[in-house]
Amino acid sequence: MSNGRSLAIRSRQHRDPGRRAGNILALVFLTGVAAGVGGLLGQNLVETVRVSLERQYSEREAATEPDTTNAPATGTIVKIKPVVTNLAAPRDVWVRLGASLVLGTGTGGDEAMRSHIEQDIVAYLRTVTLAQIEGAVGLQHLREDLNERAAIRSNGAVRELIIESLVVQ
């Protein structure tokens, strides 16, 4: 009989609505405390990051002066005709390259020099494969190679070749 009585007492304890309500209230209270603490810590973290970024930005602005090393002091920009040719591989891929030349001071962009540079660009592009000009690194290599070719062809009159457009079809 004592076993039957203890089971009845246990089952009444689990059904006690006051105890169940107390557990729910404790759960709600702890959830509210956790949400409040999490919100305060989140705000503190956001504020700390904002202050740190502002400090870094102001330090960088104060330390950095305008960079004029890449800007030409004086010079002339001359547009060349767009170049259309096919690539070395695959043969059915065509490229259209629009570019301008930055000439040094005191150098005139004569038509013969521009024509020779255009021919060099065509000759170079016919040796390039599609894989070589894909992506940012490929475009950078293409730009460097074309700059070098233009400077050599013009005997140093061309400071830079600016690629304005590159369409691969």
Image (cartoon, rainbow, N blue to C red):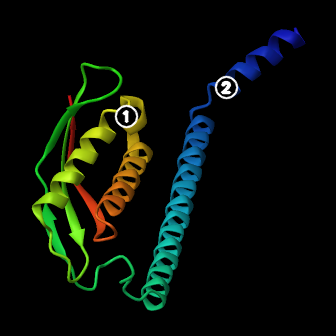
Residue 15's label in the rendered image is none
Position in image of residue 77 (x %, y %): 16, 70
Depth check: 114 or 30 in front? Answer: 114
The part of the image, by quadrant, that contains residue 23 is top right
| Residue 66 x/y as whole percent | 36, 86
Residue sitting at x 58%, y 44%: 27
Give the residue drawn at x 45%, y 86%.
Answer: 64
Q: Is residue 51 above or below residue 23?
A: below
Which label number is shown at residue 128?
A: 1
Residue 47 visible somewhere in the drawing: yes
Left or right of residue 86: residue 16: right
In the image, residue 7 sits, relative to residue 56, either above or below, namely above
Percent x, y for residue 92?
24, 19
Instruction: Say which residue appears at 55% left-offset and 65% top-offset.
Output: 41
Where residue 57 appears, as percent x and y from the top left, is 44, 80
Disc 1 secondary structure class: loop
| Residue tagged 2 | 14
Q: Is residue 164 visible?
A: no
> For the C terminus, which image quadrant?
top left
- Mark 2 neighbour class, 10 Å CA radius: few under 14, some 14 to 19, many 20 or more: few
Q: Nearer the viewer, mark 2 or mark 1?
A: 1
Q: Quadrant of the N terminus?
A: top right
